[in-house]
Amino acid sequence: MELSGIASYLISFLTFAGVYAVLALGLNMQWGFTGQFNIGIAGFFAVGAYTSAILTTPSSPAYLGGFGMPFLIGLAGAVIASTLLGLVVGLITARLRTDYLAIASIGIAEMVRLFVKNEDWLTNGVRGIAGIERPFADTVLDSPLTYLVIVALFVVGVYFLVERAYASPWGRVLRAIRENEPATAAAGKSIAGFRLQAFVLGSAIMGLGGGLYAHFFGFLSPEAFMPLYGTFLVWVMLIAGGSGNNRGAILGAVLVWGVWSGTELLTGLLPTEYATQGAAMRVLLIGVLLQVILVTRPEGVLPEKPPKLIARKR
Amino acid sequence: MTDILQLLIYGLVLGSVLTMGAIGVSMIFGILRFAHFAHGDFMTLGAYLGLSFISAFGLSSWWALPAAMVGMAVIAVFIDQVLYRRIRRTQPVILLIASFGMALILRSLVQLIWGSDNQTYTSGIQFPWQLDWLGGMRLKPDHLWIMLISLGLVAGVHLFLTRTRLGKAMRAMSDNMDLALVSGIPAERVIMVTWVIGGALAGAAGVFLGIDTRLHPVMGWTTLLPVFAAAILGGIGRPYGAIAGGMIIGVSMEMSTLLIPAAYKPAVAFAIMVGMLILRPQGIFKGTV
């Protein structure tokens, strides 16, 4: 009994960490590779989650849909929706300093949250969408463990995709833009074009993370997409793990999610009247952790290792 | 007609709050080249410091203003010395991440110390003056004071920037950092004064917001987006532009309630900002792109 409790906690822990790893990999594409500062992750995450939820839930009079589509169609929809959002944000900001992207992206995240909260016809507003099923629902395969395997497969898939992108000539241009923008422009590369591509691809990955989250948690409400959970944790994960390093992004997701849920266990021991103080204490701890990493080890646990240059034979 | 005039007053009050925040954001961007994401939470902390001060000494609500301004000036310099100064040598964008983390630290501190319920400076309702010569429009004394005091603070910042050596040095650093440094401008002193002014104005903005509405741990964070919109609209790095930007954003946000649900007020600020980023990213007064 005790053992199965631990096992189910572990499965839930790893599934969450996996969802966050997907988000961190998406952010790595934008920030780690290209140096684009997106702090609207919660917005892309929410768009992905809601799109998948609306596509896959059984039809309901309370909100648009659901269309009762299969899991994979829901995920595809999540990716497409967040790609479109990324395209809009990217087109506006690709030519500007990254500070403007930071400000615009936080605005987009707030707008998405306001929209989700106030447009009841689409999202059921603050009441949220319930009953989002896992894939293989009502079959023998339906278990939290199966879903963990599915999430893990997606993490591995996304990892290979971004790792390949990192090593490719395309990824080299992104790193060049990050390191020295004028020199890259002088080499004839379209800065805005490459930035836009990296931003949109990263947004698509975040949308996928949102879809995976929706089917794991089964219930969506606007409160789940506060900037704290959606955005800040992912940033701390990437910085702690090592920005620019895809393995670092995954490791950071597991480590920081471990710290975050570990402190939840600790504050759970407090009497209920201290619940809000406990929550604030956890945020404070994560915030301080970020500052300590930035001051003492800004490169993270696993620093970036660019592929070795292969000398051309003469 | 009276409705529009009434909304104009609300807009100018909100605009005063935004201006106080946007001047600080703009100056910090001009000198340190990063968007300071903890500015909204500076406002929150300032408002709560004011609350503690007046309740500790049993003073009336306007005494919160000097307490918040002095307190936030000190705290801003302290945060800069302890945290931002250590990472200033790396890219400015690292400062951006640090300030984002600082925003959450300050907000959770406010929650820890003062709790997360709504609070007010004074209980009870203030009776507005009815201005019959303006079609029966109502004006709260507090609103008048908010506008007058922010006018005074803006004038003070203006005099500082144009009449004092340090103010001129600050404008020089904002215009051309390298040239200013080689001509022997004391960079650390200028940075410190930037934080003093930015922190004090953020404290004032927080108290205005607290007097106008109520105190809540996310009051500043939700105001951050309009503050940035105001700073961008005026041209980021341009304190004077921030005044125009703040007033335009504040009035547009309040006027928009005639046409769209009030819940979408921040969306108006965001829409103006996005339009500006597309059409004229340098802002009305040509800031640093």
Image (tube, coloured by chain):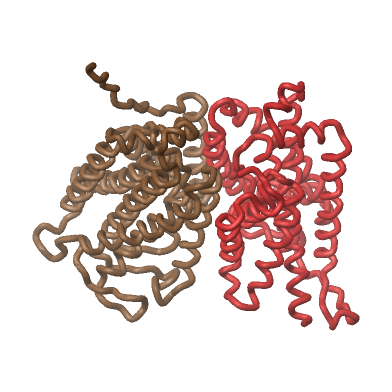
Q: Quadrant of residue A251?
A: top left
> Which residue shows up at 41% across the image and 59% down it?
A85
Residue B25 visible somewhere in the drawing: no
> Which residue shows up at 71% across the image and 51% down it?
B285
Give the farthest residue toward the front. A314
Q: Nearer the viewer, residue A78 or A314?
A: A314
- Colour of chain A as rendered: brown
Give the farthest residue toward the left. A140
Location of residue B79 in the rendering, given as x and y in whole percent from the top left corner: 64, 33
Q: Nearer the viewer, residue A46 or A2?
A: A46
Q: Which chain is red?
A: B
Is residue B119 toward the left or the right of residue A230 in the image? right
Location of residue A314 in the rendering, given as x and y in whole percent from the top left corner: 23, 16
Is residue A161 toward the left or the right of residue B2 in the image? left
> Which residue shows up at 59% across the image and 45% down it?
B37
Location of residue A167 in the rendering, given as x and y in whole percent from the top left corner: 28, 33
